[in-house]
Image (cartoon, rainbow, N blue to C red):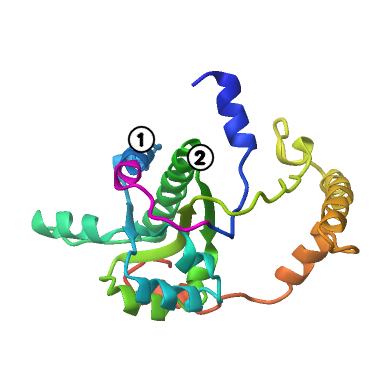
């Protein structure tokens, strides 16, 4: 792939929530997963696993548990991305040692999954398919865990819908480059808020074009983080074996 083609692919990302149906080719899934495995992984621990959920009844139930997101059941394929310390525990205990998970190990696993998942999504997008990450998988995490019969030390983090897109959503503006790229030190609060103001103006235009006038990015952020969300997730991961202390 030429450099320009790569940047075009990266810049063309959209979140697709309406899919045309039809299975995603098994060979393509295997190629994309294999390519995703080439993502960077701290100390080569490869602390990720991905579960493809095929059963239609399970996918219907997962759609409910994710907050009524129909794309979970309607996409050509649905994957659950997991931080996997189960594999590490088995290896350590087979060697006759005691597995001692800690917060840094859990953080490494989460980062590993994120890098793997981004490669996976890019692979599917390069093949012309649409994708949608599903953070709502953590809305009712205990029920998701029970439905999929996940063992201890395996932590479901988010889902990924893949399939032929039935819509062409517009690209959402991103923060100005100067808001995310700085030299040597983090910028002043005034600089940060100036970037927020510029982004609000861009997002206000995008929202108005989508029939949602009066909305801004910072307004959504203020509502989103004004109260705790999914407050039970940390305790659930800890009960599953994560070292979060």
Q: Nearer the viewer, residue 227 or 173?
A: 173
Q: Residue 125 location in percent, x, y? A: 51, 41
Q: Quadrant of the rendered structure where residue 22 is? A: bottom left
Q: Does the magenta segment cover residue 23?
A: yes
Q: Which residue is mark 1?
A: 38
Above/below status of 140 relative to 133: below
Q: Does the magenta segment cover residue 233?
A: no
Using residue 167 as the reference point, say whether residue 129 is left or right of it: left
Above/below status of 182 relative to 17: above
Q: CA distance from mark 1 to mark 2?
A: 21 Å
Start-end of magenta stretch = 20-30
In this rendering, the label closer to the viewer, 1 or 2: 2
Q: Count of labels shown?
A: 2
Q: Residue 80 location in percent, x, y? A: 39, 61
At a point 31% along the width and 65% down the height, the residue shown is 154
On residue 63, the disc is none
Q: Residue 119 location in percent, x, y? A: 45, 40
Residue 96 visible in rendering: no
At a point 36% along the width and 71% down the height, the residue shown is 56
Assign a secondary structure to mark 1: loop
Q: Which residue is mark 2?
A: 128
């Amino acid at each position: 792939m030429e450099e320009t083609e790569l940047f075009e692919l990266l810049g063309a990302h959209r979140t697709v929530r309406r899919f045309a149906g039809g299975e995603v080719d098994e060979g393509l899934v295997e190629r994309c997963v294999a390519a995703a495995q080439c993502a960077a992984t701290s100390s080569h621990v490869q602390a990720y696993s991905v579960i493809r959920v095929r059963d239609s009844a399970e996918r219907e139930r997962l759609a409910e548990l994710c907050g009524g997101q129909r794309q979970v059941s309607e996409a050509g394929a649905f994957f659950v991305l997991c931080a996997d310390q189960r594999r590490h525990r088995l290896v350590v205990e087979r060697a006759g040692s005691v597995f001692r998970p800690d917060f840094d190990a859990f953080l490494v696993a989460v980062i590993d999954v994120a890098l793997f998942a981004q490669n996976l999504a890019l692979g599917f997008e390069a093949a012309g398919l649409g994708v949608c990450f599903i953070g709502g998988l953590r809305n009712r995490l205990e029920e998701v865990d029970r439905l999929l019969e996940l063992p201890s030390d395996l932590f479901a983090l988010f889902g990924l819908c893949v399939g032929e897109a039935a819509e062409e959503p517009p690209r959402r503006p991103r923060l100005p480059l100067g808001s995310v790229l700085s030299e040597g030190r983090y910028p002043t609060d005034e600089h940060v808020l100036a970037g927020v103001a510029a982004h609000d103006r861009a997002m206000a235009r995008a929202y108005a074009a989508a029939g949602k006038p009066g909305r801004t990015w910072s307004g959504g952020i203020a509502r989103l983080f004004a109260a705790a969300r999914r407050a039970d997730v940390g305790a659930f991961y800890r009960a599953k074996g994560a070292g979060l202390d």
